[in-house]
Amino acid sequence: MARNVAFDLNHPLMEAGLESPIDEEGVHDSFSQLIAEQSQNGGASDSDAFELQELQRQLDEEERDNVAFLSGPGRELREFQGRRQRDAEWEEAETQADPLIGERWSSATMKILSSMPSRTIGRNRGAIISQYYNRTMQLRRRRQSRPAIRDFSRSARPSIRGYGIETDSADAEVNKRDRLVNNLQNLSVSDRIRMLRAMPLNVSEKSELRSLALQKEKRTLSRRIPCCSQLKYYIINGARQGWYSWLSFLHSLHLWQVPLKRVSGRFGSGVLSYFLFLKTLLFFNVFLFLVTGAFMVLPQALHRPDTSAGRLPFTGLELLTGAGYFSDTVMYYGYYCNYTLGKSCRDDGWVHDVSLSNGTMPDCVSKHLPYNMPLAYFFTIGVSSFLTCIILVYSMSKSFGQSFRIDKSHSILAIKTFCSWDFKVIKKSSVKLMSENICTQFKELLAEVSHKQVKNTRCQRLWRLMVHGLAWAICVASTTACVLAIYYCSDHMHQNLQLLLRSGVPVNNPLLNEAILLALPVLVSLINLLLPGLFNLAAWMEDYESPSVRTYVSIGRNLMLKVSVLGVLCYHWLGRVAADPETIGLKCWETFVGQELYRFLLMDLIFTILDTLFGEFLWRLFSEKVLKRRRKPVFDIARNVLELIYGQTLAWLGVLFTPVLPAVQILKLLLLFYIKMSSVMMNCQAPRKPYRVSQMTTVFITLLCFPSFLGASVCVTYTMWSITPSSSCGPFRELKTMFQAGKRWVEELEKDNPNLSVLARAHSYLVENPFFLFVGAGIFLIVIYFHSQVVDGQRKIIGLLQEQIENEGDDKKFLITRLQTIHEQKRTPARRLVSQNSNC
C-alpha cells in the first residue's frame, strides 16, 4: 500500500547540510560563472578564487559514498564508526515515526528526493537578494563593468546553506538591499516588474523594494529633469493614478458586493446562493422592464387615448387590489389602443378607437412618425420572451459547465490553503471579512472530506424506507388537499360573480367588491406560508444525514406545491374567466386577469414580510428571552428560493396583461433583498453542519428555466394563439386571436409592395406554424444536452488525469524505496568489512 513520504526541514540531517545536494546546483553554477568572469576581468584575487574552488571541491567530495573513506587512517575509521552508532540510534527512533525513513538516505536517493518540486526551496533571503542583485547588474541600461568579488562582503556572495559558509548579518543584508534598490532604479519599468515578479520573496518585501526604487528614482529625476519634463511626468503619473482610481470605483459599483461577502463569510455558500439567485432575477426583470417600457409603455403614455368614461378617484385601496384608479392607466392591457400612433385626426372629429381591419383612420395626415401599437405590442412580448429564453439557456449551460467540474475536496483544500488569500486587501474590515469567508469555506470543505457513508443493516434500511414513504405520503396528501381547496374556492368565487350579475342588484361600493377578490390571493399565500413548515416537519422525521440532500428534497416538495398551485390558477384564469367573460360581466377580461396577477404578487410580498417578522425575529426573541437559549433559526433555503421562482412565474405570466408588472417585481425583489439580508444577519444562525453546495445555483437556474419560464411561455402562447381577445378594449379588439395582428401587418405589406411576398411566406411558415416553435425549443434542448455531455466528457478526462497523477506519485514512492533497497544491498559488504576490522 502506498505511503506518504515525510519531509522535515527541521530534521538534524537537514541542518547538517545533507538535505539537497542538487538543491544548490544553481548556486554552484553561479560560483563557476563568477570565477570565470573574474578571471576574464582580472579583478579577482587569488585568495577569493582559491576559496571558491576549495568550496566547490568539498561539495563534490561530499557527494561520494562514505564507503570510499573506509581505507583511511584508524582515527578516521573510529570517527566513522562513531557517526554510524549515532546514525543507528537516530534510525531506530525515526523508523517508528515513518516506515519509509528506515535508514539514512544515500546520496543517490537524496539526489532523487531533492529533484522533486517540494525540495527545490532551500536558500535563505540573503542568497536570494545576492542572486537577483547579480541579475540586475546584467540588465542595467548603462553598461558598466562588474565589481570585483573582493569589493563585496562575504554575505553578498552566493551562499550555500549548511556547507561552512557564514550566515548573513543584518548590516550586510541591508547593504545588499540598498545595492539591489540602486540597480532596480536603473532598470526600465518592464525589466523592473519582471525582476520583482521573479524574486522568490513575499509580497511585502517586493512592495518594499518597489517603493524604495520608486522613491530613489523620483529623487534622482527631480535633480536631473528640468521643470517642464517634471511637469509632464507629474501629469502622466496623475492621469495614470486617476485611471486606476476610476477602475477601482467601477469595481466598487458592483451591486451588493460587500453584503454578499458578509453572508458568504458567516453563513456559507448555501445561503449565499439564495441572494445570488435573487440578484439574477433582478437583472431579468430589469431587462424585461426596459424592453416593455421602451416599446409599449412609453409610446402609449405619450399618446394618451380619449376615453369617454371618467377616471375613478384614488382612494388608496388600489395599492392592494390594483383596480379602481389603476384600471384606466398604462398599467393594464385594456388601456392600450388599437390604431397607429402619430395620426392626428381630432380636428376632423374622428374617434381614435378604430378597428384593425382598416389599419389606420381614414383621411388622416401623419404629423409624426407612425407607430403601429398592436404590432409593437405583439412583437415586444414575443421578442422579449425569446431573448429571455436565450439568456436563460446560456446561463444554464454556463452554470452546468461551472458546477459539474471535477472539484475533489482534497485538491480544493490545497488550493484554498495556498492560493485563496488576496494580498491586495489592506483594510482591516476587508481583511476580517476575507478571513471569515475563507474560514467558512474551509469548514464546508472539511465537512465534505470527513463525511462518511454509514452502512445500515437491512432492518435499518427497511425502517428508513418506511419513514421516507410516510413523509412523502404526508407531503403529497397535504399538497393535494390544498390544491383542491384553491380549486373549489376559485370556483365558488366565480359562481358568486355570476349570481351577482344575474340578480341585477346595483353595486353600491365597487371597491368593496374588488376587495372581496383578495380572498383567493390571501388563501394561496397562506398555503404557501404554512405548508412548507409541514414539509420541514416531515424532513425532521426522516433525519437526513447530509444537509445538502435534505435541501434538495425540500426543494422538490416545495416545487411540487408551487407547480400545482400555479396550474390551478392558470386554469381558473384561462379556462373560466377568459373562456366566457360575459357570464361574470367582464368587458375586458385581460385587465381582470392582470389585476389578479398583481394581487397575487403583492400578497406574496406581504406574507413573506410577515413570515420574516414572526417566523424569524419573534422566534429569536422568544428563544433568547423566554427559553433562555442562544439557539436561532436556520435560514430555509428551499422555501425562500421557491418563493422567488413562484413570484417570477407570476411576473412572466402577467407581462401580457400587465406590462408594468416587471417594475412591481423589481421593487419587490429590492425590498426582499434588504429585508432578508437584515433578518439573516440578525435572527439566523449558520448551519450546525456546514456543507458545500457546489451545484445549487445550477439547480435554481434549471428550475427557473423549465418549470417556471416554460410554463409561463406555454400559457402566454396559448393565450395569443387560441383565446379570443376582448372586443371593447386592448390593442387586439375585434380580432379572433392576438396572433392575427402580425398576419394582418404582413398582408398589408404584401399589398403595398408585391416584392415582399417572400416575407409573407416566411411569416406563415415560421411564425404562424407552431411546428417551428417546437423545433426551436427542441434545438435549445439539444444544445443543452450536448453541452452537458461535453462537460461530462471533460469531467471524465479530468478524473483520469487526476488518477494518473496519483499513480505517478505512487511510482515515485516505489522507485525511492527500490533505490534505497539496492543501495543497502551494495553497502552490505562494507558493513561486513567494518565488523571484521572491529573484531581484529
Image: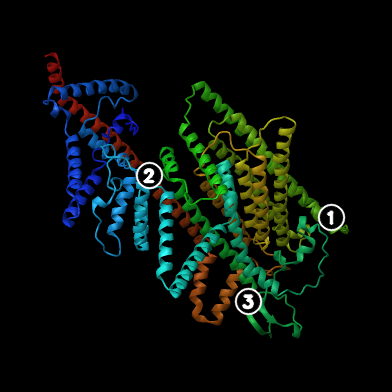
Residue depth check, mark 2 versus mark 1: number of the one nearer the observer: 2
Q: Amino acid at mark 3?
A: Tyr
Residue 752 placed where, x, y %? 56, 82
| Viewport quadrant of the C terminus | top left
Image quadrant in which you'd find residue 809: top left
Secondary-structure class at tag 2: helix
Spatial separation of the CA atoms under disc 3 and disc 1: 39 Å
The quadrant in which residue 508 appears is bottom right
Of all residues, the one furthest to the top in this rendering is 839
Task: Please give the residue where the numbered disc 3 appears in the rendered image.
Answer: 371
Q: Residue 810, can we see it?
A: yes
Circle 1: residue type: Leu
Residue 283's tag is none
* Mark 3 or mark 2: whose residue is earlier in sequence: 2
Relative to residue 108, is residue 281 drawn left or right? right
Indicate the amino acid at tag 2.
Ala
Q: Is disc 2 surrounded by few (<14), some (14 to 19) or many (20+) residues within 10 Å?
A: few
> Which residue is painted at 58% across and 41% down in the image?
267
Label 3 or label 2, whichever lies nearer to me, is 2
Query: Residue 29: percent from the left, percent from the top?
Result: 21, 47
Residue under label 1, please give it: 512
Name the side, left or right, on which 592 lies relative to 139: right
Residue 90, image x, y percentages? 29, 23
Write the residue at 47% across / 31% down: 450
Q: Would you call the spot at circle 3 few (<14 residues within 10 Å), some (14-19), or many (20 or more)?
A: some
Disc 3, SS: strand
Count of number-bearing discs: 3
Residue at the spot of label 2: 170
For the residues marked 3 and 2, what is the alpha-carbon distance in whole angstroms? 82 Å
Please state, as top left, top right, bottom left or bottom right, where the N terminus lies in the image. top left
How far apart in space, not on screen, are marks 2 and 1 (Cα)? 88 Å
